[in-house]
Image (cartoon, grey):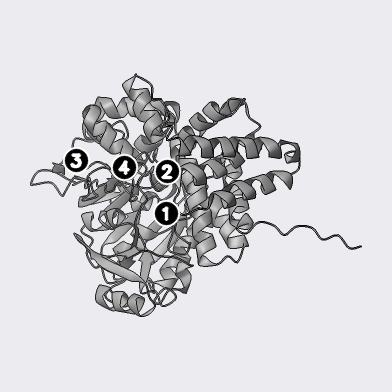
């Protein structure tokens, strides 16, 4: 007699991959990088790619909520569970409690099967089954989690955020404003494209996408932007990608390069350039008729700048692997030689928690304090490279005033020849999606202008005095973006 093993439940692979991402993030990986890796290694159909992304990002985003349910439903508190079991239960609970249109049987059966097939977890398969079925009973009974009475803890649990962050939000915005920002941190971000006007036009790209069944619409106050709705599949297969007609860039990030007001013939420095979204935007704005230096500490990441520039057909960008804070020491001939400088500074990323959900669990008050000297070093190291009457944009993707307004005010005290011309900030809950600070060329009697800018909402990519952490981001023109 031949015994045949039972077939694996349908949908097992996407859930296994999402579980892999959760374990990788718990071990220290960035969620976007871990997700990109598992998607790259498997040839999945679009619906399965979407499911992996939703399960991984959703479970990471809702970690605190899911732990609270584990504490309530299980015999062992979430933080005392074996890590592999905890993350597997998160995948199952997220489907049952926070997703729609997922059959209960699929969520439960796949989780139990994953436990059975995992080394060291097979004996706990009954635990997985018991917790998930208890969750079903709680859901059907209309049970909810009881929130703490303390307002910061209440907001933190309701929106799956750290207590220290919600406490700061209340200090910055008051109770009502803090609740609005906390809610925005869990908004599913849009997918925006930036059209390369040197090769196409927004109308033409929109038409090409429509012919392929991809819906898009122009973005208000974002002249080169298109917003995609209901996207799926690998964007590199979309019309116009290989031809360099467009790249992926949030509408908020698209607002930063224009703050420089770059002109043909300018010498321009992008100090923290990889993966090249803003450097290529600057090149497009000047018709590829400028000398643009894209500097980054990582030679590997600079390869992405070169690849993106080549795909977009841009020849004005020169890549340099160096520490931007020490450029004057390495290249003294660059003193006062750049008409435009963009400092896309390393930051806490508190303005991008919707797009990078793992940041809420990785960033701490201590890590933020550790970033402040780096930001100051970049500002002080690059101001001497600014030509008379030049402009400098300081950008981050954080909403923390210590990284934004405080850095700018301290810079003005250290360098009184600089002048703050205009300052404005919009918050994550503000639909228009941009806060920015502008220092422009100063009036008579001042040597320099400084033009620090920042754009974005946690559903987009850039925020408050501006921009982009210096670590590797999978969201790049040559990468598959995240939902």
Q: Which label is found at residue 184?
A: 4
Where, quadrant-wise, is the C terminus in this rendering? bottom left
Which residue is the site of mark 2? 326
Q: Position of residue 221 (x, y in %)?
A: 19, 59
Left or right, 458 with respect to 321, comes to left
Left or right, 293 with respect to 259, comes to right
Q: Residue at x 27, y 75 (%)?
A: 201
Q: Residue at x 60, y 44 (%)?
A: 24
Q: CA distance from mark 3 to mark 2?
A: 20 Å
The secondary element bearing badge 2 is classed as helix
Tell me: residue 339, above or below residue 367.
below
The secondary element bearing badge 4 is classed as helix
Q: Are marks 1 and 4 in contact (CB under 8 Å)?
A: no
The secondary element bearing badge 3 is classed as loop
Left or right, 143 with respect to 117, comes to left
Q: Residue furthest right?
A: 1
Q: Which label is found at residue 304?
A: none
Q: Earlier in the sequence, mark 1 or mark 4?
A: 4
Q: CA distance from mark 3 to mark 1?
A: 23 Å
Residue 472 visible, this angle: no
Which residue is the site of mark 3? 418
Which residue is the site of mark 1? 295
Q: Earlier in the sequence, mark 3 or mark 2?
A: 2
Q: Earlier in the sequence, mark 3 or mark 1?
A: 1
**How many residues crowd around disc 4 within 10 Å: few (fewer than 14), some, or many (20 or more)?**
many
């Amino acid at each position: 007699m031949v015994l045949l093993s039972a077939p694996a439940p349908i949908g097992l692979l996407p859930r296994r991959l999402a579980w892999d991402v959760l374990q990788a993030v718990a071990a220290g990986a960035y969620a976007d990088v871990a997700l990109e890796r598992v998607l790259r290694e498997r040839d999945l159909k679009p619906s399965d790619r979407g499911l992996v992304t939703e399960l991984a990002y959703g479970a990471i985003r809702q970690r605190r909520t899911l732990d609270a349910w584990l504490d309530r439903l299980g015999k062992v508190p979430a933080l005392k569970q074996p890590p592999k079991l905890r993350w597997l239960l998160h995948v199952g609970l997220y489907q049952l409690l926070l997703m729609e249109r997922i059959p209960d049987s699929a969520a439960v059966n796949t989780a139990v099967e994953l436990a059975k097939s995992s080394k060291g977890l097979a004996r706990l398969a009954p635990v997985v089954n018991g917790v998930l079925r208890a969750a079903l009973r709680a859901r059907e009974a209309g049970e909810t989690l009881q929130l703490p009475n303390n307002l910061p803890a209440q907001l933190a649990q309701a929106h799956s955020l750290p207590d220290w962050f919600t406490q700061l939000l209340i200090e910055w915005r008051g109770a009502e404003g803090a609740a609005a920002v906390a809610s925005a941190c869990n908004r599913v971000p849009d997918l925006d494209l930036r059209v390369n006007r040197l090769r196409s036009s927004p109308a033409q790209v929109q038409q090409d996408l429509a012919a392929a069944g991809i819906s898009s619409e122009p973005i208000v106050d974002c002249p080169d932007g298109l917003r995609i709705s209901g996207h799926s599949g690998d964007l590199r297969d979309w019309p116009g990608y290989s031809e360099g007609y467009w790249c992926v860039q949030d509408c908020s990030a698209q607002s930063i390069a224009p703050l420089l007001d770059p002109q043909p013939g300018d010498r321009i420095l992008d100090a923290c350039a990889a993966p090249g979204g803003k450097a290529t935007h600057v090149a497009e704005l000047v018709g590829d008729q400028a000398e643009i230096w894209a500097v980054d500490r990582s030679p590997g990441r600079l390869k992405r700048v070169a690849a993106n520039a080549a795909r977009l057909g841009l020849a004005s960008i020169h890549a340099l692997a160096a520490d931007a804070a020490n450029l004057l020491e390495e290249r003294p001939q660059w003193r006062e030689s750049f008409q435009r400088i963009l400092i896309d500074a390393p930051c806490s990323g508190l303005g991008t928690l919707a797009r990078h959900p793992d940041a809420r669990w990785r960033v701490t008050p201590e890590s933020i304090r550790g970033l402040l000297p780096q930001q100051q070093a970049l500002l002080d190291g690059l101001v001497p490279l600014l030509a008379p009457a030049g402009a400098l944009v300081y950008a981050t993707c954080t909403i923390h005033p210590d990284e934004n307004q405080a850095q700018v005010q301290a810079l003005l005290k250290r360098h009184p020849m600089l002048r703050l011309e205009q300052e404005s900030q919009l918050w994550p809950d503000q639909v228009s999606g941009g806060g920015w600070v502008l220092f422009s060329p100063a009036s008579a009697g001042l040597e320099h202008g400084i033009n620090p800018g920042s754009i974005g909402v946690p559903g987009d990519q850039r925020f408050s005095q501006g921009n982009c952490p210096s670590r590797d981001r999978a969201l790049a023109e040559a990468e598959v973006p995240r939902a």
